[in-house]
Amino acid sequence: MSQATDSSSSATAATTPEFAALVAEMQHATGAVLAPRTLTEKPINGHTIYLADCALDMRFGQFRAYVFQDIIDKHYLIALAYGDIVRAPVLYTRLHSSCVTSETLRGCDCDCMQQLEGALKLIAQKGNGILFYLMQEGRGVGYVGKARDRMLVQASLDQISTFQAYAAMGLKKDHRNYENISQICRLLGITAPFVVLTNNPDKVAALRDQGLPIAGTETLEFEPSPFNLAYLTSKASAGHILKRPGATTVRRALPPEPVKLFKPYALPGAQRFIHAASYFLPMTPADNDILLTAAQFQELRQSNVLERQLATARPCVRGYQLLRENRFFVKIDADNLATFRREHPHDPLCELLTTPYWFRVHVYYDIVTSQDFVVLTHGQARPEDIPVVRLHSESLFNRFPLRTVSNQDKFKQAVKHIVTYGAGAMLLLYNDGRGAGFGAYAADRMLTERGQAQSTDEAYRQLGVEYDSRDYDASVLLLKQHLPGGKIQMVMNSPDSLVTKTEYAEALKKHHIDVEKWIFLADGDGD
């Protein structure tokens, strides 16, 4: 009896004006992010907290990025807003899950980058809209799970789908959670109904389940490629609204070598790293330079295609170059070749449009930091080779179609150096803000944009962050596992990088890696 009385009393207390006043003291009102406030105030709703906001100049116009974080599992969320998101009668909206392989690594085995850019372009054209960028790689299972899916699918020669691979590994077909969306809408004061840009009916249902109004939907579909046709076909079979996979004449393409399955294991010389997966990534070529083997090149030469193309008024081929190990770059004019393909769809020359750079992706789980590490390798480095090596830091913002893409350009340049030499490796550092994390990077952008700090160094002092927090020792230790000899060619942004990053050189020395040659990219600090 007393327990029931206590429970009833608690329920009554929780509805009193006094209790409501207490709650009001510890949380911000609806729309607090856009309301006048100090920069040190961090509005929160449910388990979503606001961190910072800043302008993003994209190819399609000026967007504003509002950065949030889930206080339970700590993942970041970015709301990319265009136009008036509060007073607009309707908002064109996309829920977009992160895809590092297409958005950073230039992979062409999915359509994620096309959907991201297509949605942002359409939102800008409509005048008002918002894209929610969610860190839910691999339909919510993370990159380790996604990579093991790709390894299994490729080992089966595309005979099983991504959804069958998930089921075989004991995973649901989709582990994503969209609860943060309604909380972000309350923090931003968004009440307009959404026109949802998606091919996935489950996303529409998830928004409706949160009580968010839906005015309609629009699909985002693009022509399949030889490398994503199997993936898109499996999505269509799973209920996604996709028509082109069943109507296309594109033929599936398989990896250049068989993919062997393996169970996760700790690296003998670096047991903090668990090797979880390895598979092939078809990468979009840099600068329209298509890589061909000697046999592929000779086939074009014998048919006189190259000479005829170089002599035409609108050539599909602009030139060619002999590379080390008897390989060739053939430079294409992508626009002319696309036009040519429409008129001659079965001509072998058209295959150059979909000839990728093949990299092998190695995915590791670090038991010390609980982070995923990604190493890309190209070619078969022999002990006598001096492979080209790069530690590449990425920013989440650089996954978007920005007007200035210096970081993306540096990635392409590094890839080009590796492919030109024919053997090399790249380790991807996820650590935004020179290792301080994306939250610190976004706060730095906000402080400098609003004049609260005159430079990144000053902003970092206000944040209480060191100049560079990246773990170069761990990165070099892992990278060393892919270097058969002790000599490398190291790609860096500029000579200044060596001066400001003494830990970089110290890590190379500690792990007995001799830099035979330094390859410097454009000026600036983004390593």
Image: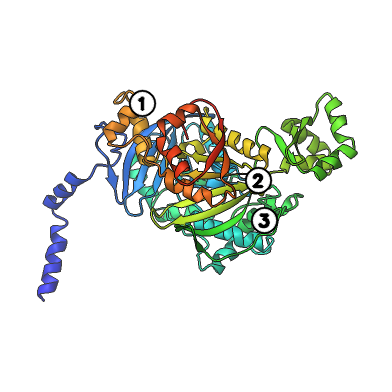
Q: Picture coordinates of residue 302 (x, y %)?
A: 90, 39
The local secondary structure at tag 1 comes to: helix
Q: Nearer the viewer, residue 372 or 230?
A: 372
Q: Does 211 sit left or right of 314 as displayed?
A: left
- Amino acid carrying label 2: it is Glu
Residue matched to label 1: 449
* Residue hosting label 2: 384
Quick one: 427 or 72, which is closer to the camera? 427
| Upstream in sequence: badge 2 or badge 3 | 3
Q: Which percent across, then down, holds residue 117?
A: 56, 38
Which structural element holds mark 2? loop
At 53% across and 47% down in the image, what residue appears?
99
* Residue highlighted by disc 3: 230
Q: Residues within 10 Å of mark 1 (few under 14, many from 20)?
A: some
N-terminal of the pair, mark 1 or mark 3, is: 3
Count all numbered tags in the image, as a single digit: 3
Q: Is the C-beta separation of discs 2 and 3 under 8 Å?
A: no
Give the percent coordinates (x, y) of residue 222: 65, 44
Is residue 24 at all visible to an observer of this figure? Answer: yes
Q: Which amino acid, mark 3?
A: Ala
Alpha carbon separation for disc pair 1 and 3: 44 Å
The N terminus, quarter of image: bottom left
